[in-house]
Image: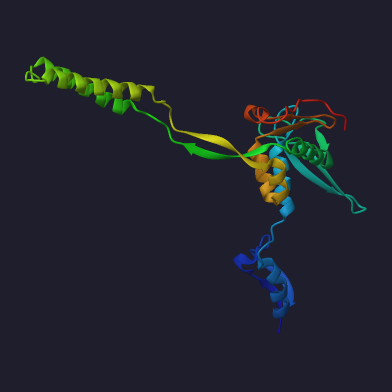
Amino acid sequence: MSYAGWYSAPADAMLPHTCAVLYACTGAHWRTIRRPLLAPRSIDSNSCWRRAILDTAHCDRCGDRFYRQVNLAKNGKVYEYYRCAKTAGKPACKGQSVKGERVTAAITALVERLAGLAMTVRRFIPGEDHTEQLNHVTQAMKDLREEKRRGLFDYPDGDDEYAEALELLVDERRRLAALPQRPSAWVEVETSQTFADAWAQADQEHRRQLLLGLKARLYMTPTTEGWYLPAELEARAPKLERTANSA
C-alpha cells in the first residue's frame, strides 16, 4: 500500500522539525528509514580525546579555552584547528588559530615528559586528638587534691595512698601530652604504577580523565606553546618551563 501526503511523525523519530513531514513512500520503506533513526547512537572514542584537548588547550593571550573547528576541503582532506572563541563581553583573539596536529603533539610531549611520574591514590588518615582524655586526667587530679584538702585521706597510710594515686595521674597526663595531635586529612600516596603505565593501559576516555587529573593547562599561539602545572605536580615531576617553541 502506498501513502502520499502530510504525515505527523512520531515524537521519538528525532527528525528535525517533525511537526509534519511531507513524504511519499510505502509503509515498508518508512519502517526501513525509521529504524536507524531510532537506533542507539554509538559513542565515538575519539570524541573523548577531543574533549580532553578542549579541556586542556587554552588561548595564550586571553586564557580562555580553545574551541575545535574542522574544515573539509574539496579534495576530501580534513583540516583541524583550535581557535580562540568569542564569549560574552570578550571578542575572539585575532590570529589565534592553531593546527590540530600541533595541539596533539604538545599533549603527547607532556605525556612523555611525565612518563616516570608515580601515580597516586587518595587515602584518609584519621587524626589524633587526646584533649578529652587530658581534660579527664586533669579533672581527676583536681578531685584528688580536693579530697586531700577535705581530710578524706586522714587515716593510716592515707598519705601514701594519696601520693601514689597522684603520681599515677601525673604520669598519665605526661604520656597523653607527649602523644601527637593532628587533624584528620586526605593525603596523596604514591603507588608503584607510573603515568606511562596508566596511559598505556587506558582507553581514550580514561586518558581524558588522566589529563583532567593533572589539572594542567596548555597555553598556545600559532607559533608558541607553554605548560602551566599546579605546584603539587611540579614538585613531583621534572619542571616544565614555559618556553617558546617554533611551529
Relative height, residue 47 to residue 151 (above, below): below
Q: Is residue 77 left or right of residue 33?
A: right
Q: Nearer the viewer, residue 10 or 65?
A: 65
Q: Nearer the viewer, residue 70 or 164?
A: 164
Q: How is the image coloured?
A: rainbow
Quadrant of the snapshot with the C terminus: top right
| Residue that lies at the very extreme toward the front in this rendered image | 157
Quadrant of the snapshot with the N terminus: bottom right
Relative height, residue 159 to residue 15 (above, below): above
Q: Is residue 40 left or right of residue 70?
A: left
Which residue lies at the image location 65% right of the left edge and 67% below the top edge? Answer: 38
Image spot of residue 33 (x, y percent): 72, 71
Image spot of residue 198 (x, y percent): 68, 46
| Residue that lies at the very extreme toward the top in this rendered image | 149
Q: Nearer the viewer, residue 197 or 25?
A: 197
Image spot of residue 9 (x, y percent): 64, 69
Q: Nearer the viewer, residue 64 or 51?
A: 51
| Residue that lies at the very extreme toward the right in this rendered image | 75
Q: Quadrant of residue 176?
A: top left
Number of numbered labels in the structure image: 0
Q: Is residue 164 left or right of residue 171?
A: left
Which residue lies at the image location 65% right of the left edge and 44% below the top edge? Answer: 209
Which residue lies at the image location 72% right of the left edge and 43% below the top edge? Answer: 196
Image spot of residue 95 (x, y percent): 83, 31
Which residue lies at the image location 43% right of the left edge and 35% below the top edge? Answer: 126
